[in-house]
């Protein structure tokens, strides 16, 4: 009897090895290798191919006719709507609202006389109907299919001939011709490739829902993200109402846009003015509270940055952040200790972005320093003053991008003054409806804001 050949594939990154290893040599994750049977390769290359090389000058420019979903925040992230024949991947934590968002989008498209096929491998048709009733959705163009068999799904797509297909989720779909279990690397890769072929050949938009790992990355091989045309993440804290839809890959548009939603009883509601929502409960006259103007995509957003500094009860002081990169806080604490003379070695430092939003923009550095200084010195930061700027390790304040958009957003909400990097002053072409104060160092900013 011939010996069955097997291989081990990492579920996180798709790295292949010929023997069992407790730790993946590719991504370093533990206990992520699964065994698969290696089938003999019977593929024979064709000698009658019809593809021929074409000069770039002879190729006609493709023009995509987009389909609007009637969710302006979603259309913004997609680059203007859905493109026929595209394969889209949506990821997010369990319970974050992925299925709710897709069902609302499907209902809007069904009202425009588009046929839609919602394929669920995790819920029955009755469960989807219950969610639709809660969201007050009723449509005659939305077909439901609770199925996980790839061959059955392909047959139903051929029969219905929909404009949009939703697969919830790709980890539950399996090809019966393969011996590996559903959700394995081989199954996810093969099923995604089949859906990509269906989308391109029939000009059908297919949207895949993907599970995420405990680190927040899409589960399965990384090749899945390379195969699809668009990758979207739905982010947010489960105990906060706000959800951020962020695009990390888009072959038909920009990846710099975000969409903001609020989770309510009637589903996800678009937030057209995020700054107003995030500053609605901002306290006045308290220490450690600073407002910073951030840029998410092309949209300026005002966020409240809160800091709490208190004496530590342990040998090593704690550093904790919510919504910000912890390493950024550690850098700012080191700058304040070395360049400004603050004693933080015996203090716990906590930092939070109010509203459950997560940002990673260096322009918040100066706001972090101001919030920490306000808390440790017990001095109230002026309520009509904003700060923006990137802080270097020598304590200098560096210029940031799109400063005019930030200032215009601040003036819209009644802020009177703003501390900005001194080098940004030369990029201001128009007269701003707000007092602008240029600073070169963090020390100078502290002297102005907190009268240090």
Image: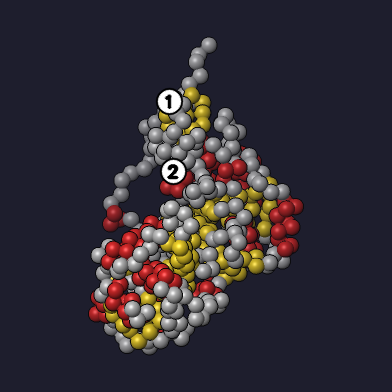
Image coordinates for residue 108, horizontal then vertical, percent: 62, 66
Name the disc covering residue 223, or none.
Answer: 2
Q: Quadrant of residue 98?
A: bottom right
Q: Is residue 199 left or right of residue 409?
A: right
Residue situated in front as seen by the camera: 237 or 9: 237
Name the residue carrying label 1: 18
Measured Cα–Cα span from mark 2 to mark 1? 20 Å
Query: Which residue is located at x 27 percent, y 73 percent?
Result: 441
Label 1 CA crowd tier, 10 Å (few <14, some 14–19, many 20+): few
Q: Examine the rendering and report whether any part of residue 8 can be seen.
A: yes
Q: What is the tally of numbered marks visible in this picture?
A: 2
Q: Earlier in the sequence, mark 2 or mark 1?
A: 1
Left/right placement of residue 41 relative to residue 147 reads left
Residue 277: percent from left, percent from top = 55, 75
Residue 179 in the figure: left or right of residue 51: right
Side of 273 relative to 265 (left or right): left
Q: Position of residue 351 (x, y in %)?
A: 46, 64
Figure check: 436 above or below 1? below
Check the image and report above or below for 75 versus 99.
below
């Amino acid at each position: 009897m011939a010996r069955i050949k097997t291989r081990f594939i990492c579920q996180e990154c798709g790295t292949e090895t010929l023997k069992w290893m407790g730790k993946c040599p590719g991504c370093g994750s533990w206990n992520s290798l699964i065994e698969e049977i290696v089938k003999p390769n019977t593929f024979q290359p064709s000698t009658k191919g019809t593809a021929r090389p074409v000069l770039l000058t002879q190729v006609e420019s493709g023009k995509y006719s987009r389909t609007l979903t009637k969710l302006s925040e979603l259309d913004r992230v997609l680059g203007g709507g859905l493109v026929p024949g595209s394969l889209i991947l949506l990821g997010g934590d369990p319970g974050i609202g992925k299925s709710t968002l897709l069902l609302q989008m499907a209902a809007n498209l069904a009202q425009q006389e588009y046929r839609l096929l919602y394929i669920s491998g995790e819920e029955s048709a009755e469960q989807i109907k219950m969610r639709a009733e809660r969201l007050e959705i009723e449509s005659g163009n939305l077909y439901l299919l609770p199925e996980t068999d790839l061959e059955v799904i392909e047959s139903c797509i051929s029969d219905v001939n929909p404009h949009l297909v939703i697969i919830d989720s790709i980890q539950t779909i399996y090809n019966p011709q393969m011996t590996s279990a559903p959700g394995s690397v081989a199954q996810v890769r093969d099923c995604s490739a089949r859906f990509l072929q269906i989308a391109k050949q029939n000009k059908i938009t297919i949207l895949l829902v993907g599970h995420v790992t405990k680190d927040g990355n899409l589960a399965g091989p990384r090749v899945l993200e390379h195969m699809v045309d668009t990758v979207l993440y739905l982010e947010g804290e489960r105990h906060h109402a706000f959800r951020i839809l962020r695009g990390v890959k888009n072959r038909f548009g920009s990846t710099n846009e975000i969409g903001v939603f609020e989770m309510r009883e009637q589903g996800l509601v678009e937030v057209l003015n995020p700054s107003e929502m995030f500053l609605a409960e901002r306290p006045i006259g308290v220490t450690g509270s600073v407002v910073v103007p951030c840029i998410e995509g092309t949209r300026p957003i005002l966020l409240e940055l809160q800091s709490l500094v208190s004496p530590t009860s342990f040998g090593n002081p704690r550093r904790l952040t919510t919504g910000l990169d912890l390493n950024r806080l550690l850098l700012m604490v080191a700058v304040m200790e070395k360049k400004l003379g603050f004693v933080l070695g015996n203090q716990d430092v906590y930092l939070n972005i109010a509203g459950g939003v997560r940002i990673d923009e260096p322009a918040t550095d100066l706001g972090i320093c101001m919030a920490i200084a306000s808390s440790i010195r017990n001095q109230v930061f002026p309520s009509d003053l904003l700060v923006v700027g990137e802080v270097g390790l020598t304590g200098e304040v560096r210029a940031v991008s799109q400063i005019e958009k930030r200032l215009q957003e601040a003036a819209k909400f009644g802020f009177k003054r703003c501390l900005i990097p001194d080098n940004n002053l030369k990029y201001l072409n128009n007269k701003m409806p707000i007092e602008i104060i240029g600073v070169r160092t963090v020390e100078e900013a502290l002297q102005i804001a907190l009268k240090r």
